[in-house]
Image (cartoon, rainbow, N blue to C red):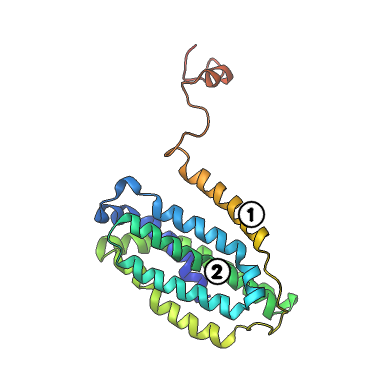
Amino acid sequence: MLALFIAALDSTVVATALPTISAALGGAEHYAWPLTAYLASSTVSTLLCGGLAFHFGLKRTYAFGLTLFAIASSLCAAAPTIETLAALRLLQGIGGGLLEAGVFIAAAVMLPPRDRGPYLGAASVMYGVASVIGPVIGGAVAQGLSWHVIFVVNIPIAIVAFALSSRSLPGRGDGHRSAQFDVAGSTLASLSVLSLVALFSLAGGAFPLGISPGSRSYSAICYPRVCPVQG
């Protein structure tokens, strides 16, 4: 729950504080890069977490995700430019995706089906709590303290979560059998997901998407009394 909470909270906190962060780093033109980088890498690692957990063991996979998330968080706090922050957020997103998916994999591996409901429900609540308090914390910290604190606060929570998960999570072969990792399928799925994330993240900025109001086709499909373009 702790690991899932900081992973879910990180997205909402950073999204709110990003205007302050980009202004401090002098990279307002690349405002969306840290968000897009985290979204892309976390989406791919969430997709691959199941295969990694069953091949290398859930304990190793989760420990790797927590370690990577904590190290990337500390480096993000010291990022000198918005481009560097985006690259570090890419690494942080890999860890965050493993944390988010690993919680639900742990419930499936360690608990019988009839006992999973309360735990999965409590895990899902973490997203709701993070979405409510994340923007408040992000704005308050960025304006009242410093945007660096947003990333540093993840480290002590990650250490506690690492200690708990190392003691409790099953290792390789404990509770489930090892499985072969589908490299080709994982690569194809990752490229497909990344292409969709890049498309919808960059649309409107790097390239136009959709029908512009002044185009001929837009005028043709509009009703005369509603269409803002005459002719």
Q: Is residue 108 placed above or below 91 in the rendered structure?
A: below
Foreground disc of the pair 2, 1 = 1
Residue labelled with disc 2: 98
Residue 36 appears at what percent x and percent y?
45, 52
Picture residue at 35% right of the left edge, 61% below the top: 138
Residue 144 appears at what percent x and percent y?
25, 64
The image's mark for residue 39 is: none
Residue 6 located left or right of residue 169: left
Residue 219 appears at what percent x and percent y?
53, 18
Picture residue at 34% right of the left edge, 59% below the top: 84
Per the model, the C-alpha gap separating discs 2 and 1 is 19 Å
**Callout 1: helix, strand or loop?**
helix
Residue 14 located left or right of residue 219: left
Q: Out of 186 and 105, give the one closest to the viewer.
A: 186
| Residue 129 visible from this viewpoint | no
Which residue type carries mark 1? Leu
Residue labelled with disc 1: 188
Residue 6 appears at what percent x and percent y?
46, 70
The residue carrying pointer 1 sits among few (fewer than 14), some (14 to 19) or many (20 or more) residues within 10 Å by Cα, namely few
Picture residue at 51% right of the left edge, 55% below the top: 40
**Callout 2: helix, strand or loop?**
helix
Q: Out of 60 and 97, give the one closest to the viewer.
A: 60
Residue 26 located left or right of residue 124: left
Q: Out of 179 and 30, give the one closest to the viewer.
A: 179
| Residue 44 visible from this viewpoint | yes
Which tag, 2 or 1, sits closer to the chain's start?
2
Picture residue at 68% right of the left edge, 64% below the top: 182
The residue carrying pointer 2 sits among few (fewer than 14), some (14 to 19) or many (20 or more) residues within 10 Å by Cα, namely many
Q: Is residue 88 placed above or below 118 in the rendered structure?
A: above
Q: Residue furthest front?
A: 184
Which residue type carries mark 2? Leu
